[in-house]
């Protein structure tokens, strides 16, 4: 029983991680709480759905299409709601991205209706039994994609020139600019990366739960925030680990204490972390007051 | 009192505008000391449920519920304000968000007030409109006085620089707690009024979305003067309703103007385009929100906006 729950927690946690990575990247580079990130996730899921139903695409095509669409959305977000808004007023970019959230959510509702939509089966469901644990092929697929993505991202950030520029900008905006980093381009690349990852996470979520709705974004956005904080603001590796940790905690509390206690636990942990370890579980560099 | 003048729809819009103005002020008070809260919807829920218990379970009259609901919320507000003293910025935003989410869980699981079924059968208050606008006027007078009082200036100085304020001898802890508790009290009032107008509340009524909206009201209106939150709440609440009526204005155009070739096509296109009954209304709302932040990131109302009105004050001697 407990192993099965841990596997389920791992599944849930992997999608939290993917969303939180995007959040934490954007927060690191811009110091911005990017509220529309949950909606990017939702848009990814719907683009995937659209491709599967209307274009007869298989899961790989759906993933690719969603990646491209959400990457474009990331570029759009930068030019429409982030770059034109003055950074002198810290709450203004927050509001403009909330505006973007409202726009995206209602476009999805306008096109697909306000109900939960079934996501068609794209991967043949085979159940594997390992002793007491049962894993479906869908779960294995989604987990594999998530892990590959995280590893690729990690390699990108650690080993490429652009990755180094992202880390430098996250460390200090002005210094990075002085040292010749094109900060505007770094911001753009960060948004593209974060949005593409969230889009893939959205499709994977649709495949896994076989149902999506235009209102799924908010819940994901809030959980992503919690994970970002658990991992330490701006800490990509922390977000990966914290996402999986939170997924497991949630599944275990839901299984043993009842599903209504799930959110209570999540946010109680959030408050404790805020008060006693504001740098996150993994003790990252202190982020000055923003 | 105003029954004969307003139809039900207008009345309801005005009530919600007023409640949103009160809620926006509840955000404004802690913001005056630099504390940004996403949890004002949680405080509204506390007020609504506390007063609901008094009026439904104990049969007490509405004014008692209003007052006690506000006070209970203020106590909870101070309790949340204590840990909030230690943190600021995005951390405080997340703390208040977590508070609002925990309130949601409590609402959902507390069977005494209906749990997931929601709190039903709250007595309808006929005079909500009058109550709401009396409170709005009182708040505006209060903030006008606060701005020129030592407490108001202490709040502003904490917002500017906490360490400097402390050095100047301001009791930062006391002022910040007071601001948080006062904000919670005002949010509680808004919650009580809301509950006794809709007669039914559940966790969806006070979702995190409402907390985000309250923050939007205050920031879009502008938080540098006390007029900002009221203007922001009024504009953002009435905007979707105004979009709804745009099509009615189009129908006022005489038929003879649009009876020939290019005009009839344009008219049809406009008519189709202005169909703001559905999600399109909210899409436009979101776009306007983004544009507002691009054009006026400091909010609609700032001190500069109010400068032309200053002569009014000079003539009466309050400089």
Image: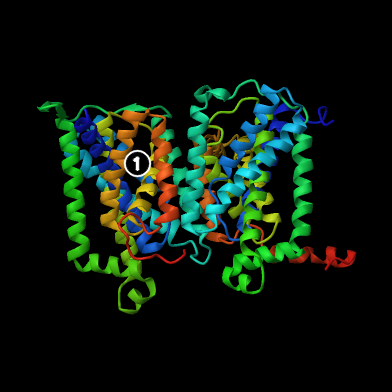
Residue in the picture at 25% in, 30% down: A53
Q: In screen coordinates, is A234 left or right of A106?
A: left
Q: Which residue matches tag 1?
A: A43
Closest to the observer, B77 or B280: B77
Q: In screen coordinates, is B314 left or right of B173?
A: right
Residue in the picture at 70% in, 41% down: B18
Query: In the figure, A193 relative to B163: above or below?
Result: above
Q: Is the residue marked by circle 1 packed among few (<14), some (14-19), or many (20+) residues within 10 Å?
A: many
- Picture quadrant of residue B147: bottom right
Q: Position of residue A269 (x, y in %)?
A: 40, 45
Closest to the observer, B131 or B254: B131
Q: Which chain is home to disc 1?
A: A
Residue in the picture at 51% in, 53% down: A95
Work out which quarter of the rendered image holds the N terminus of chain A and state it: top left
Name of the residue lying farthest toward the bottom: A178
Closest to the observer, B305 or B147: B147
Query: In the figure, A17 relative to A264: above or below?
Result: below
Q: Could you tell me which secondary element the residue under label 1 belongs to? A: helix
Q: In screen coordinates, is B285 left or right of A247?
A: right
Can residue A94 be seen from the camera position used here? Answer: yes
Q: Position of residue A289 (x, y in %)?
A: 46, 65
């Amino acid at each position: 029983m407990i192993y099965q729950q841990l596997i389920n927690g791992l599944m849930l946690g992997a999608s939290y991680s993917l969303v939180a990575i995007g959040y934490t990247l954007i927060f690191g580079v811009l110091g911005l709480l990017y509220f529309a990130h949950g909606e990017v996730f939702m848009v990814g899921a719907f683009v995937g759905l659209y491709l599967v139903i209307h274009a007869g695409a298989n899961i790989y095509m759906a993933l690719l299409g969603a990646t491209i669409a959400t990457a474009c959305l990331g570029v759009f977000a930068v030019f429409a709601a982030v770059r034109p808004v003055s950074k002198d007023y810290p709450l203004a970019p927050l509001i403009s991205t909330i505006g973007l959230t409202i726009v995206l959510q209602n476009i999805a509702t306008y096109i697909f209706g306000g109900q939960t939509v079934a996501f068609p089966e794209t991967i043949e469901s085979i159940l594997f039994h390992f002793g007491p644990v049962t894993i479906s092929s869908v779960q294995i697929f989604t987990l594999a994609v998530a892990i590959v993505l995280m590893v690729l991202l990690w390699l990108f950030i650690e080993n490429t020139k652009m990755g180094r520029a992202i880390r430098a900008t996250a460390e200090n905006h002005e210094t990075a600019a002085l040292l010749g980093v094109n900060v505007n381009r770094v911001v753009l690349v960060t948004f593209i990366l974060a949005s593409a990852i969230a889009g893939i996470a959205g499709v994977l979520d649709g495949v896994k739960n076989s149902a999506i709705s235009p209102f799924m974004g908010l819940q994901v956005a809030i959980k992503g925030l919690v994970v970002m904080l658990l991992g330490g603001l701006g800490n990509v590796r922390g977000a990966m680990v914290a996402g999986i940790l939170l997924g497991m905690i949630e599944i275990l509390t839901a299984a043993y204490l009842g599903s209504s206690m799930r959110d209570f636990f999540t946010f109680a942990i959030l408050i404790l972390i805020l008060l006693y370890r504001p740098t996150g579980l993994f003790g990252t560099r202190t982020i000055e007051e923003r | 009192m105003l029954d004969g003048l307003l139809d039900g729809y207008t009345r309801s819009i005005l009530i919600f505008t007023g409640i949103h103005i009160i809620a926006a002020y509840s955000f404004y008070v802690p913001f005056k000391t630099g504390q940004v809260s996403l949890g004002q919807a949680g405080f509204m829920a506390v007020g609504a449920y506390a007063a609901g218990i008094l009026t439904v379970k104990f049969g007490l009259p509405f004014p008692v519920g209003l007052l006690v609901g506000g006070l209970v919320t203020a106590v909870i507000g101070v309790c949340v304000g204590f840990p909030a003293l230690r943190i600021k910025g995005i951390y405080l935003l997340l703390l208040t968000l977590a508070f609002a989410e925990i309130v949601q869980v409590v609402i959902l699981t507390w069977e005494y007030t209906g749990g997931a079924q929601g709190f039903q059968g709250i007595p309808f208050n006929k005079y909500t409109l009058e109550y709401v606008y009396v409170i709005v006027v009182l708040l505006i007078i209060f903030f006008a006085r606060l701005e020129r009082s030592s407490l108001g200036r202490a709040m502003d100085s904490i917002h500017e620089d906490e360490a400097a304020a402390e050095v100047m001898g301001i009791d930062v802890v006391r002022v910040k707690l007071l601001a948080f508790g006062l904000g919670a009290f005002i949010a509680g009032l808004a919650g009580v009024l809301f509950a006794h107008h809709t007669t039914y509340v559940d966790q969806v009524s006070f979702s995190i979305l409402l907390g985000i909206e309250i923050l939007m009201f205050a920031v879009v209106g502008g938080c540098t003067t006390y007029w900002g939150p009221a203007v922001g709440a009024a504009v953002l609440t009435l905007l979707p309703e105004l979009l709804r009526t745009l099509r009615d204005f189009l129908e006022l155009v005489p038929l003879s103007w649009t009876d020939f070739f290019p005009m009839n096509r344009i008219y049809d296109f406009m008519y189709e385009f202005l169909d703001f009954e559905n999600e399109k209304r909210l899409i436009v709302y979101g776009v306007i929100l983004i544009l507002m932040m691009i054009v006026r990131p400091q909010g609609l109302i700032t001190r500069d906006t109010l400068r032309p009105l200053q002569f009014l004050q000079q003539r009466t001697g309050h400089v």
